[in-house]
Image: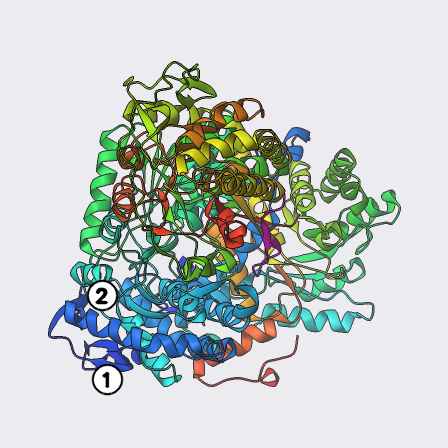
Amino acid sequence: MSVADYFDTMDYGPAPEADGDARAWIAKHDGLFGHFIDGQFKAGETTFDSHEPASGKFLARLAKGSTADIDAAVKAARKAQKKWTALPGHVRARHLYALARTIQRNARLIAVIEALDNGKPIRETRDIDVPLAARHFYHHAGWAQIQDAEFADYDPVGVVGQIIPWNFPVLMLAWKIAPALALGNTVVLKPAEFTSLTALLIAELAQAAGLPAGVLNIVTGEGDTGAALVDHPDVDKIAFTGSTEVGRIIRQRTAGSGKSLTLELGGKSPFIVFDDADLDGAVEGVVDAIWFNQGQVCCAGSRLLLHEGIADAFIAKLTRRMETLRVGAPLDKAIDMGAIVAPVQLERIASLVEQGVKEGATLHQPAGAIPSSGCYFPPTLLSNVATSSTVATEEIFGPVAVSMTFRTPDEAIQLANHSRYGLAASIWSETIGLALNVAAKLDSGVVWVNTTNMFDAACGFGGKKESGFGREGGREGAFEYLKPKLWKNTKPRPAITRPEASPATTGFDTPDIDRTAKLYIGGKQARPDGNYSRSVASPKGESVGDVGVGNRKDIRNAVAAARKASNWSAATEHNRAQIIYYIAENLSARTDEFAARMARVAGSTPAKATKEVDAAIARLFTYAAYADKYDGRVHVPPLRGVSLAMNEPIGVVGVICPPEAPLLGLVTLAAPLIAMGNRIVLVPSEVNPLAATDLYSVLETSDLPAGVLNIVTGDSLELSEVLASHADVNALWAFGSDALCTKVEQLSAGNLKRTFVDHGHQLDWFAASSEGPEWLRKASEIKNIWIPYGE
Amino acid sequence: MTSNVTPISPSASIGHNTDDTHQRNQPMALDLGWVRDVRVNLSATERRVATLPGRRTVKKDAQAAWLLKAVTCIDLTTLNGDDTEGRVRRLCGKAARPVRPDVMEALGMADRHLTTGAICVYHRFVGTAVSALEGTGIPVAAVSTGFPAGLSPHHLKVQEIKASVADGAQEIDIVITREHVLTGNWQALYDEMREYREACGDAHVKAILATGDLKTLRNVARASLVCMMAGADFIKTSTGKENVNATLAVSLTMLRCIRAFYERTGIKVGYKPAGGISTAKDVLTYQFLMKEELGRDWLEPDLFRIGASSLLADIERQLEHHATGAYSAFLRHPIG
């Protein structure tokens, strides 16, 4: 076209970003890349090919990591870890700072390679991914610098295995390695098989920047390579970002290994538009929510929930806007969307859209052409989607939004939360009261008010429910790469054995009145469903009392009662504190009675048992004290606004108490959970469940609302399995045998419960470290609410 | 910007048809419900305009063409206390031949009769400009109604419009009374605008909102709607004399109002950012915004004007660079 032609048509014309340097870098390696292990590049024994999504053309040949490669990388990381951890924080800060600067210095090269390899627009790699990656290293250089002051009670986790997805290769790499390295861990990272190049480039740059050998290792490969990393016995932690399906497998495979785990998984994030929103602003929000990175974003606002009164107007505005979106070559500087990462993804998107239409949705796609060859899918909206439609619940992971309507704010919240996922949400309303109220009530790790897809190194990112657990970024993200020192010198728990209880006989003396403890469910003492009971024996085999044997139906009832007690999560912190104080007060009035019975079961002295009761009372006071003091933070990302990091209850939490410390153990676990607003189903110590059953009347007189604390006595292992596989339990704390903990972790994969287990290691329950903020952190989840300002 | 109204034709695409001269805006009744419904979120607006330059660009021949198009949309302006007839005549000469003929030739555009969109002057120089521009087809725009503060006696403001029209001005750039917006007196704003519109007769009227004085985007949006309801042919950001003149965020807000107005009435109102657009790079971003938010039609001078005095000189340098491959200098292009 000539100048005159353009003058008449006012078309945009091509605007290609030069890719010469990027291709020269690949050519310099002869298009063949190895692993980066112990500071050296190492050829792979077998290889696989990587292609350009935009054209389908061959891009590079990559090493396929074997078990031996993973082993070599883990060994290198282990070797380096001691020295790396021992470095002063300031020295590690210098290294992180150098990585940040290196990324900035090479920003355009990284951005172009990323666009070539992934198919995403150069605008996004250049303006978003790479700057955010650099920001992550800057921010975490800071955590290294102040680690000793800020995290005195924590050590680094050790050797961390990290597996990242293909949707943000270099950004996810930064999210993973910056906090890990900053806090004294060493890393073995496996990039996604579709997009390994920028990781290898970063390795090269890190080598040049003087990062010590073994601190950062990169092993490329496919699923097998990742599995070898997950299974490696000398890895202390796995941090994974990817699909919920694979996350579940990783949870199962790491169960019982003692590996700590962070999972950042899928989503079906709601994008809620109220009738008082800036609708044009919200339309642009949708563009940034679902047509960012071709919709291949775990937190993409893919579920439009529109107030019924404005739905038609909004859809009209949105479909008009879709007409102006340009889909084209990733290196074109005047496009909005590039290529889908691989044909297999393209097929999945297309078939889901087809299914959505089959199930009654109205399809909207712009008239504009998409490139005829290469891996492209047009921006797509499916309106009038029924909640029962596949596309309403399934993560499409492509440029496809689905829409449905709501009538009231309550209904919007209900629809938004009615999902297995809970990653992110976006709320559009110009009324502050409405927007913040809804933000507080959404079950998601991130909420954006009048904005969407905002990320920053200072703010935690991560999900609730089946969107995974753990946070990345900010202080909350730092904890994921630290382990509390309180576990440091714990030893495997000695077995407590009890002989069969012999019948208690008093001969012709007046016997005690028979006391058979029932279960405590929904604020009532309930007979166990199976109607069996068992005796609780002293070490000498004397029967001290009888307790019910709970079964799976009792657990079911208890979980239902806990689910119903949602008012507790909404109660004020002051109110929760008052009730916990009151429990302590009522318990203290009965100290002697508790101590006497505990001493009989334990075969110890009342004086010793009194110490445990007193410690339990003090611990209740601790959590009553913390209830209104363990508050959130206000993060300050680079934004005219704030991000509120709110500590929220996890929901319904199962608790398996340890066999020892029947009262103090119970209080240590239950009190922080209750203080943070969770509702509990608790299985008491098998050795002395009477300490728990004696508590029923204390709870009843302390105004604890029904269903907040439910107690089911019985076989710990059997009941833990029921709790772990229950889909309506959000978290499970299990303190007991290694076998029990392993089972709990395995079965929790079903709905990706947050687990907190001791792997059979016994804590000192009386220690000061057995209470406090670390426990409250475990008992809550952080939601980051982003609130930009401005009129 | 929002209005809870179903557009008259939800699927109406805003396409370009050069043969179609659009219907002139006629005053409608003041719709206070629509005005009060307006919501503009500043951060969301800013995000859109901040990312736009990364989403759109034009290179090489396309860029040259876009810049030439921008030239046709410039209201070449002189609004200074020291303006004289000689100064105005010199500017008119530039308006008639804005780009050097050899550059036009090199760009393959020699056969196109390229001029700026208009000349914009104070009332005193309307006659001078009309005679200087005779035969060029370039309209003369007069700033009016007590420009720039707009606080002269009302009857004098109306008389000023009539006098400029009598002298041959085809376009009148009025300034609104900011007080009406700042106090939410939409009726007064509407009445004033209607009266100005009437006084203009066949001359087109551009309503200057002085957005730098209005401060909030919500004020900008409401004032835009009221002026369009009262019959404005164009809405314009600023006089060039406020502390803050045209910005992309203000522009986006006004363009969305224009779109909403079009969707509801079928009438295309024009847009004129003024002040602060001084580089070729700047003007391209405004053009992208016009095309993206309103469509192809709004890239032509009948719906898009740029109030600028130094922009043309920068465009000329870019065009010469495009024609020769070498960077140019201001002194190689006739002074305006």
The numbered mark 2 sits on a residue in which chain?
A: A
In the displayed structure image, the side of residue A336 where residue B221 appears, left or right: right
In the displayed structure image, the side of residue A382 where residue A227 appears, left or right: left
**Tags 2 and 1 both on a single chain:** yes
In the depicted view, which residue is nearer to us: A391 or B97? Answer: A391
Please name the residue that numbered disc 2 is placed on: A52
Q: Residue A628: which numbered mark, if any?
A: none
For residue A216, above or below residue A761: below
Which quadrant would the N terminus of chain B be assigned to in this image? Answer: top right
Q: Position of residue A298 (x, y in %)?
A: 35, 50
In the depicted view, which residue is nearer to us: A385 or A284? Answer: A385
Camera-side mark, 2 or 1:
1
Is A633 magenta? The answer is: yes
Q: Position of residue B19 (x, y in %)?
A: 44, 48
Q: Position of residue A200 (x, y in %)?
A: 28, 74
Q: Position of residue A672 (x, y in %)?
A: 51, 42
In the depicted view, which residue is nearer to us: A244 or B326? Answer: A244
Q: Residues within 10 Å of mark 2 (few under 14, many from 20)?
A: many
- Where residue B108 sits, quadrant-wise, is bottom left
- Where residue A96 sits, quadrant-wise, is bottom left
For residue B194, above or below residue A477: above
In the displayed structure image, the side of residue B227 where residue B10 appears, left or right: left
Q: Which amino acid, mark 1?
A: Lys
Q: Residue at x 81, y 44 (%)?
A: B179
Q: Residue A28: which numbered mark, if any?
A: 1
- On the question of residue A386 being in view, the answer is no
Q: Which amino acid, mark 2?
A: Glu
For residue A522, above or below residue A352: above
Q: Earlier in the sequence, mark 2 or mark 1?
A: 1
* Disc 2 secondary structure class: loop
- On the question of residue B194 being in view, the answer is yes
Magenta residue span = A628-641
